[in-house]
Amino acid sequence: MTDSPPSLRWPRSFAFLLVKDFSMMPFTAAIEPLRAANRMSGQALYRWSTLSKDGAPVRASNGATVQVDGMLRMVGLADAVVVCAGVNAYAQLDGDLAAQLRRASRQGALVGSVCSGSIVLADAGLLDGRRCTGHWEDLETLAENYPALDVTKSIYEIDGNRFTCSGGTAPLDLMLHFIGQDFGRDLAAQVADQMLHHSARAATGPQRLALSERTGVHHPGLLDVIGAMEANIENPLPLPALAEHAGLSLRQLERHFAAQLGQRPAAYYRGLRLGRARQLVQQTGLSMLEVAVATGFSSATHFAREYRRLFGHAPSQDRGG
């Protein structure tokens, strides 16, 4: 780890702080490279422990329960602390937990996160003024809720003694970076080979699949339109302008959407905006009028009507949940 003090001892210790409903895949993608590094080198280069706030087992978002090694107060014994969170991260914010993380940072530990753990670090004030990232679903609300952060769309970010990482398998790329920094590229390559990870992604690589892979659409003009829709949620572009941008007539646009996506372009665009609105409702304190404006609806009444039509209930019910 390039920013770690030279006095850190080997093996380097990681404490994985599990928050209720944490995502299992990023957690295991962070631990497994450390295990493989020890195995491939024949030495105990890394050690790790799992912690929870009270030492009790933690249930992951997939329903599996993980028995931990200790309580949150033990976090100061580690060289690096990794907060693992997932769905409902905002509901798990805790002042006691934040204070313990700040204490670990004051004691010299590197402090980082995977997946939605960046929300926990942000709430503790540990990412103020730092470049940081998280799961792509969280990025806009993270920036909205914590304006002091420099939120990026990177796979992972390392800024001084803070590191943040997106979800899924991205922590594998982060740990390969750390292993390469600590013990050289050869060991990192051996670990990647063991993980069947053919090439480590750069920190600034894209989190999401290419638009064509996400949508199953391959028509260049249609991809241009969908990309423009995703980029213009707050101020929706009129369909004729979108069609012209892609070099299509409005009739051609309608036909391509029907053939490849099974719906009309207006309905598809509205679904994108309402999906974004649902994130804002669930993850921010914005008023319903502010959410409506942020997603291109003319009024809170219009927004609520369209929300109910798509999701079957009022937006206030999602906030209450």
Image (spheres, rainbow, N blue to C red):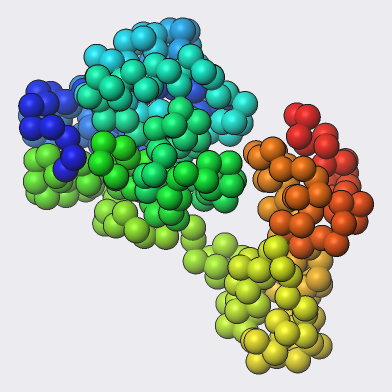
Q: Nearer the viewer, residue 106 or 23?
A: 106
- Left or right, 85 with reference to 288: left
- Left or right, 142 with reference to 205: right
Give me the residue at 32% from left, 10% from top. Answer: 74
Above or below residue 309? Residue 195 is above
| Quarter placement of the N terminus | top left
Above or below residue 202? Residue 112 is above
Above or below residue 226? Residue 161 is above
Q: Nearer the viewer, residue 232 or 63?
A: 232
Give me the residue at 24% from left, 19% from top. Answer: 107
Task: Specify whether residue 321 is in view.
Answer: yes
Q: How many marks?
A: 0
Question: Image quarter for residue 110?
Answer: top left
- Left or right, 41 with reference to 176: left
Task: Specify whether residue 49 is in view.
Answer: no
Give me the residue at 77% from left, 43% from top. Answer: 287
Which percent across, then down, holds residue 286?
Answer: 71, 43
Which percent across, then down, holds residue 33?
Answer: 25, 36
Question: Image quarter for residue 279?
Answer: top right
Which percent across, then down, holds residue 205?
Answer: 36, 60
Give me the residue at 22% from left, 24% from top. Answer: 108
Which percent across, then down, holds residue 298?
Answer: 85, 62
- Left or right, 88 with reference to 107: right
Q: Nearer the viewer, residue 47 or 144?
A: 144
| Quarter placement of the C terminus | top right
